Image: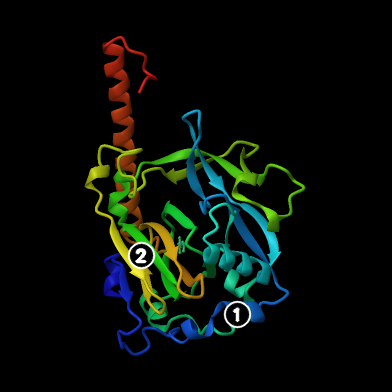
Amino acid sequence: MRFVSRNQPFVVRKDSGLAGATPFKDLSRLWTADYLSGKMKGEQVQVAITPHGNADSIVQLSDGGSVFVKPYEVMEPFEQAIHAIFTQEKLKNDQGATRYLQTQNDNLRGEYAKIFADVMDPIAWAREALEKEPDAVNFWLGNSYSVSATHKDNYENIYFQVCGKKHFVLMSPVEAPCVNERSVLAATYEPRDASIKSSDLKKDDLQIRIDDPEVYIPSVTWDPDNPLLNTTPYSNYARPLHVTLDAGDTLYLPALWYHKVSQSCGEDHISCSINYWYDLEYGGLFWSTAKFVQNIGLLSLQNTEQERQAEAIRNGRDVNAK
Ligand SMILES: O=C(O)CCC(=O)C(=O)O
């Protein structure tokens, strides 16, 4: 409760020895690729397919513009999807399309209900500290080719690593002015040729299609791993935290923290996680203060842009020239 009230992350390591702190410890031994394939045999699951493991991410176009691209989504038998994820990792197949099982719609209690039975009740300490039940329990399965781009969620997040590792880059809500959130045109990956079966897709078979009707999505455009691009005047003040979760570790990721997430695999050639989302507390000062900081940051960007244009006009330059 002290950490939640301070909106401050922490990790419970698997060997911390805190009674009840790591209730899913045994899941890391149980959920091997073989076990999951057996339990989920015959189940159809939604699969996100991308050329570079970049679901829901900003892609720079050759004409200089950028789009927010969502994955190509298909239904596949679970055992086919896990086999493709496993095989791409094992063979280090850079030419294959990348699959990530990442539907964040309470999928563990929905399409993965057959393995939800292995997961105990929501973590007792989280229920006590957050004083609520989870809105969603999610299952994630991928390989080292997938990266979740920097974003934030309106949820308190308890994130448990089952197997493989997850590498988080975290930035607090107060760093909103650093991350250059903008409305970006939405697009979706689709196969160039509709006759190619999803199981045969290579990364070059996917192309970007702008969504119709056009939609703009608020997106983080500054990448802490590429800090000289898409900066704001404040980006160099960001102090990203780097946290790696090993199998059996649990992260408390507080609401509205920006996070970029990559993964690596152990000898099972998969990375698997579960997480619990609890709605954030909108009463009190936290939400309004975070919004205030975000809006002040956005306003100062507009001012910077207006100053740049005013100076360009004073100097008789083309205002659209960078
Ligand atoms: O595990 C991932 O790839 C992303 C996790 C995430 O964004 C979340 O739990 O909110």
Residue marked by disc 1: 34
How was the colour assigned to the protein in this rendering?
Answer: rainbow
- In which quarter of the view is residue 130 placed? bottom left
Can residue 105 be seen here?
no
Q: Which mark is residue 254?
A: 2
| Residue drawn at point x = 41 percent, y = 77 percent | 247
Residue 216 point in image, percent of width and height: 53, 39
Q: Amino acid at mark 2?
A: Pro
300 up-or-down from 139: above or below: above
Residue count near mark 1 (Cα–Cα under 10 Å), binned few <14, some 14–19, many ≥20: few
Q: CA distance from mark 1 to mark 2?
A: 33 Å
152 up-or-down from 22: above or below: above
Q: How many marks?
A: 2
Residue 211 point in image, percent of width and height: 62, 39
**Secondary element at image label 1:** helix
The outermost residue toward the front is: 91
Image quadrant where one finds the C terminus: top left
Depth check: 128 or 153 in front? 153
231 up-or-down from 247: above or below: above
> Which-is-in-front pick, marks 1 and 2?
1
| Residue drawn at point x = 56 percent, y = 85 percent | 118
Residue 254 point in image, percent of width and height: 36, 65
Can residue 200 be seen here?
yes
Q: Which mark is residue 134?
A: none
Q: Amino acid at mark 1?
A: Asp
Mark 1 touching mark 2, by CB under 8 A?
no
